[in-house]
Image (cartoon, rainbow, N blue to C red):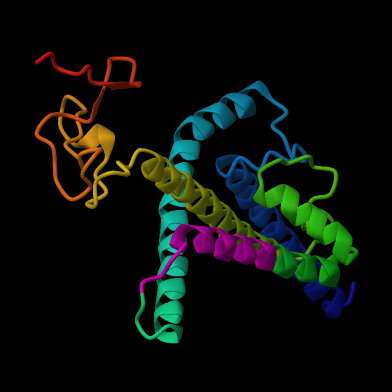
Amino acid sequence: MVPGDILNAVYMSCLFTEYKHARIKLVIYNLFMVSGYGTITPKTDGGRLLCIFYALFGIPVAALLLQALGKSHHALVSATIKAVESKCTSGKEVVYQEEKCVLGTLISFIFMICIGAWIYTNEEGTYLEGTYAWFITFTTIGYGDIVPGGHSKNPGYIWVRLIVIMLGLTVTASVLTAISSCLEKRDVKALTCSGCPAGCLVKLCCPAGRCYGHSVGSPGTYRSDPVFELDNSGRIQEDEEKNA
């Protein structure tokens, strides 16, 4: 065997070792991020018990991390929308802020899928396959029929895949945060007292759930008795008129 063959064999051995280490990190990463492809699974009882132990501690930590990153991305999108719209409208108040945040985070989600699909075409398959594979990954459906990086032997591509998965799951968490914030605001609007100019909330007016809003007959004056109150079941009941 010539020295060149020996050096080549050593290089291939080191490359394979690096590839195995990267694959191990990828398995743990997918376990914590609940991707659940099913292409690499523990085969022994010890490995399965270790997998359960890691998942019990790793998944909650990963969920908290994604929640924090998602809220940060949502706040960034919200601040960007507010800054751009305030500049374009000469400092006027931004309307439909939550709805625009939902749209902005959805655009970010689509952008991340496009980036992942483009990376997929450089290593493995078609753009449509990449779009499908990364959508399944970012939404944690995890069918496992098409796995990004599943056929690549390049350790560097595995690290790129880990970064893209992290960014994609962050954007997914941001989309869910934006939708939740939008729905919460709609619920608040539904509970707002329409007769009160301060926009008080029925459930937050006082511990008894009474609203001292405008008088029905005179919008310019306030009444001293509750307009309506909430019973124990949370339903609004009209006050009975007091007998003279």
Of residues 82 and 175, the one nearer the viewer is 82
Of residues 82 and 241, the one nearer the viewer is 241
Q: Quadrant of the C terminus?
A: top left
- The spot of residue 22 in percent (x, y) is 65, 56
Find the magenta span and give its range.
93-112
- The spot of residue 97 in percent (x, y) is 45, 63
Is 198 positioned to the left or the right of 155 in the image?
Answer: left
- Count up the numbered dots: 0
The residue located at (60%, 66%) in the rendering is 108
From this view, report whether residue 237 is shown above or below residue 19.
above
From this view, report whether residue 236 is shown above or below residue 108.
above
Of residues 236 and 187, the one nearer the viewer is 236
- The spot of residue 39 in percent (x, y) is 78, 40
The residue located at (66%, 51%) in the rendering is 138
The residue located at (84%, 79%) in the rendering is 4
Is 148 positioned to the left or the right of 188 in the image?
Answer: right
Quarter location, residue 130: bottom right
Is 47 positioned to the left or the right of 13 in the image?
Answer: left
Q: Decide whether the magenta segment is chiefly helix, strand or loop.
A: helix
The residue located at (74%, 48%) in the rendering is 136
Is 125 positioned to the left or the right of 38 in the image?
Answer: right
Name the residue at the front extreme. 244
Quarter location, residue 18: bottom right
Does the magenta segment cover residue 103? yes
Does the magenta segment cover residue 27? no
Q: Quadrant of the N terminus?
A: bottom right
Of residues 26 and 176, the one nearer the viewer is 176
From this view, report whether residue 52 is shown above or below residue 20.
above
- The spot of residue 169 in percent (x, y) is 58, 53
Quarter location, residue 242: top left
